[in-house]
Amino acid sequence: MTQAMTRTGSDAARARLAQSAVAYAFGVTQDDLEAPTRRSREAAFARQAAMYLAHVAFELSLTRVAQAFGRDRSTAAHACHRIEDQRDDRGFDQYMDALEACLRAAPCPGEPD
């Protein structure tokens, strides 16, 4: 297996981890986050939060985030900008800080313990 294939697999695993955390925290389903369409405003916002967290917590490039989520790079960039704008709200910022800390502390598939 090549390094690129391993990285792609671990990127997808990190994306799923971010999606699972966000689905639980935001009260949406994993199916809502993985849907190819917006579904609802809540699901779209939660998906944006998951993309943002994958980018920030796991230090994935926007291109890698987009690939892991099956979206365009411009969509991942828009998601990150949208969440950054929302972080001006102190409560939301603290919530995202907590989610980010949880994801950073979680063991990532494909990495040594």
Image (cartoon, rainbow, N blue to C red):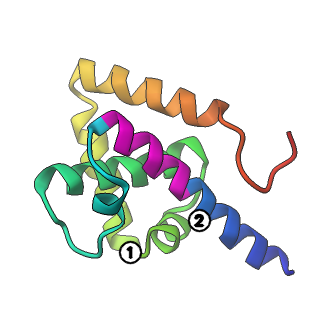
Task: Give the vertical position of 59 relative to 72 (above or below).
Answer: above
Q: Is-magenta flag for residue 30?
A: no
Region of the chain picked out in magenta, as a range: 15-25
Please state which amino acid type lies under the numbered disc 2: Ala
- The picture quadrant where one finds residue 23 is top left
> Farthest left residue?
41
Residue 22 is a magenta residue: yes
Number of disc labels = 2
Q: Name the quadrant of the N terminus.
A: bottom right
The residue to which callout 1 is attached is 71
Which residue occupies 67% across, 72% down?
8
Q: First in sequence: mark 1 or mark 2?
A: 2
**Residue 25 picture location, percent across and down:** 35, 34
| Magenta stretch, overall SS | helix
Q: Which mark is residue 12?
A: 2
Q: Secondary structure at mark 1?
A: loop
The three-letter code of the residue at mark 1 reads: Arg
Camera-side mark, 1 or 2: 2
Residue at horizontal 70 percent and vertical 47 percent from the top: 108
Secondary structure of the residue carrying tag 2 is: helix
Residue closer to the observer: 110 or 81: 110
Residue 84 locus on image (x, y percent): 31, 41
At x 28%, y 38%, the residue is: 26
Distance between the alpha carbons at the discs numbered 1 and 2: 12 Å
